[in-house]
Image (cartoon, grey):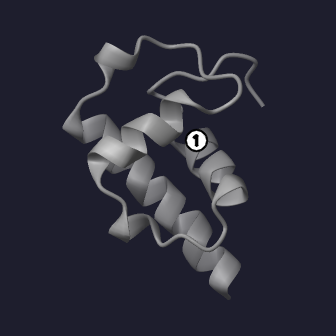
Amino acid sequence: MPSDITWNDAEEIGIQLQEKFPDLDPLTVRFTDLHKYVTELEGFADDPAKSNEGKLEAIQMAWYEEYKDAQG
């Protein structure tokens, strides 16, 4: 696991979000809430202003893949 997480670490962020919110369907999360969840992760060390829609979409999709795997 990287010591510092940035907006470009979509897969790692997806894994951590799935661990933190195992029962939350990522596709129901608004980008404003997703942004907040990411910036509050332990190890997140990027500028909160550097996010954009594309990065949030990549994170949401990575989280959704983890969510689907966990659902079986």
24 with respect to 3 (left or right): left
Residue 23, quarter of picture: bottom right
> Can you say whether 5 is above or below 26 in the image?
above
Instruction: Locate the C terminus by quadrant.
Output: bottom right
Instruction: Locate the N terminus by quadrant.
Output: top right
**Residue under circle 1?**
13
Q: Nearer the viewer, residue 31 or 55?
A: 31
Residue pictured at 31% horizontal, 16% vertical: 50
Q: Secondary structure at mark 1?
A: helix
Q: Where's residue 33, x and y in %?
A: 37, 46
Residue pictured at 65% horizontal, 84% vertical: 71
| Total labels drawn | 1
The residue most toward the bottom is 72
Residue pictured at 31% horizontal, 25% vertical: 51
39 with respect to 57 (left or right): right
Q: Where's residue 44, x and y in %?
A: 60, 22
Residue pictured at 21% horizontal, 39% vertical: 53
**Neighbour class for label 1 at 10 Å: few (<14), some, many (≥20)?**
many
Q: Where's residue 19, x and y in %?
A: 72, 56
Amino acid type at circle 1 is Ile
> Can you say whether 39 is above or below 31 in the image?
above
